[in-house]
Image (spheres, rainbow, N blue to C red):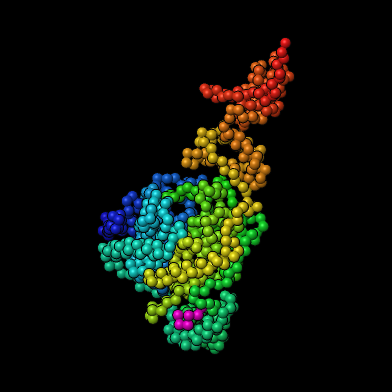
Amino acid sequence: MLPNHKVKTFQMPDGTEISLETGKLAKQAQGSVVLKVGKTMLLATMCYAKEAKEGVDFLPLTVDYQEKYASLGRFPGGFFKREARPSEYEILISRLIDRAIRPLFPSDWHADVQLQVTLISGEKDVMPDAYAALAASAALIVSDIPFTGGPISEVRVAQVDGILKVNPAISEIARATLDLMIAGSAKDIVMVEGEGNEVSEELMLEALALGHEAIKSQCKAQKELEEMVGSTVKVAYSHEKNDWELKDKLYKLLYEKAYAHAKTCNANKSERGEGFKAIIKSYIESLPEDSTEDKGLIKKYYHDIEKDAARNLVLDDRIRLDGRKLDEVRPIWSEISYLPSAHGSALFTRGETQSLTTVTLGTKLDEQTIDGAVISGSSKFNLHYNFPAFSTGEVKPNRGLGRREVGHGNLAQRSLKKVAPPEGEFPYTVRVVSDILESNGSSSMATVCAGSLALMDAGVPMRGGVSGIAMGLITDSKTGKYAVLSDILGDEDHLGDMDFKVAGTSKGITACQMDIKVDGLSYEVLKEALYQAKKGRAHILAEMNKTISQPNVELNANAPRIYTIKIDKDQIGAVIGPGGKVVQEIQKTTGATITIEEIDNKGVVNIFAVNKDALDAAVRRVKGIVAVPEIGEVYEGVVKSIQAYGAFVEFMPGKDGLLHISEIKWDRVENMEGVLEVGETLKVKLMDVDPKTGKFRLSRKALLPKPETSVA
């Protein structure tokens, strides 16, 4: 029944057993593998189109990662109670797989490829994302697609209690001081993404080395699975039309012109691009009307010429397109409080990249709810990144949030969240929004810088300023030459071999993201890039410090205020009241917002208001409810009811005591008629509390002067 069923089982250095199974599920896919580790199971499938669409000159790869709620015995949230569009978390995992695999396809493969990785069984303490790329790569390896750069794999490396661990449990990740996702082949590292508590470059390199060793063993297992499946004939595929004589001709005619323009034109992005276009335009216009040269091929080959000229300019003359030195950062200027009504705002401009970032402070009610199959809970620190078409001078329809926006926003959020104040010290929910107004190189790192400035402007007590920089790389495998570039342009990102973003404080790295566009990256080059990035981050932070170097002592005048009261757990019910009656009445009469939760066996009451009067009124009401009456203290009370034997007086919110007829005044009072009225205010003294019933005994006469006794 299963003639091609094969299973490869292997152990990781820590004893974890992993199996890769093919030939049992989804057999009509061109590649299908089930990965098992403990109770966790991932199904990875790969399908591709037999032919490329006309005119396609790129790899149309789609990667989708999905976690089924049934895999952990859960129901999806929402009205429809079924899996819907991918969550941001699933999008981020899809991106991790995509970025690791995409550079390793043949350069001439332009047919549609779809990879789907699905969590079909899970465990509460196992993070399946660390195994998703391994499953995806295995599905490619057992197929007939020419995955020439593979196999690859991906692991998580975290520092837990001072020890580096590969693929730690979810409970361990929660207290990790370093959390990295590392992808690589048996030869090199190809992708890195993660965050850290201001970690050193040395620790980062140590974690990468440990992760790569684990990746090597997983790549070895995939090759052994491939051998078990048997020799699968790889598809011989190339739909590209070429004219090598035309290519040689164009190189001879146009390369020197392109090189000269790249070397001498240090203008902005637009002018530089127009200069390159003028060269090819002039050539096409010079062709005779009866020319048979393919204009599509001419433009394609000229793109290669332009790219080679710019790369060789850096490698041979150590000159960049805009004339900067290899480690030079573009001019920076910044400004805070640019938006008068925001709780905090900042403009950060570096070269031709600009971010306008705002900070909004809210209550617990503004937290983001996270409802995933594996991860659930809430988030009190969120960063959103927007990249409109006008930022690059383009015309594109707005079609909602894209995967790029999700990925860039997540990187910036991780960079800043590591130095944000803990919830116990800062009860606000924080939302940071970066709108990119100009883009020519690393708008995500501009978001980090602008976000740091805006948070300080808002008065959020950050532990330090955070700056970020994007590093590039240009290599020549034939000569061994390479150049590490600081603060890369958009063009340098396009023509280069690496995009390595590093963010951090003056103390260390808080987040990083690296994509490699070649087969891999040696540790020596990676080390050089990390330390060159450290120098660049320090320079950028120094420029930012000229605008603001410490958080404002007071919250921005526009920001709402929160007052926190910690109460005994058994007092929570008194503040809430029956059916929420008490807290709702306080909110209605004062205009404040009140949230109550139990933390560490204590009640935490957060009172939130947009003006001081509302805040003070609500604070007084809550304090009155939770205050403990003290015998001998004097209170201002309100008469609530009158009986024949005295009156009941509310001397504290929710606390009534008996003012006996004998305690109203020194003279004898025969009856209560006309003595007091309901609603009347008067000062009373708490005389006693019954230890059995908890009833309060009040006195008014104790506050009145005692009359002198006459002597007969």
In the foreground, 145 or 51: 145
Q: Residue at x 26, y 63 (%)?
A: 228
Q: Residue at x 49, y 42 (%)?
A: 599
Q: Quadrant of residue 564?
A: top right
> Which span is picked out in magenta?
315-320
Looking at the image, the residue that sits furthest to the top is 712
Judged left or right of residue 183, residue 607 is: right
Q: From the top left corner, tell me how far across and down residue 446 is, in percent.
A: 55, 65
Question: Quick check: can you spot residue 196?
Answer: yes
In the foreground, 594 or 684: 684
Looking at the image, the residue that sits furthest to the front is 711
Question: Quick check: can you spot residue 402?
Answer: no
Judged left or right of residue 306, residue 173 is: left
Q: Quadrant of residue 229?
A: bottom left
In the foreground, 676 or 35: 676
Quick one: quadrant of the N terminus?
Answer: bottom left
Is 93 inside the magenta-drawn segment?
no
Judged left or right of residue 248, residue 690 is: right
Q: From the top left corner, tell me how far across and down residue 244 is, in percent.
A: 43, 84
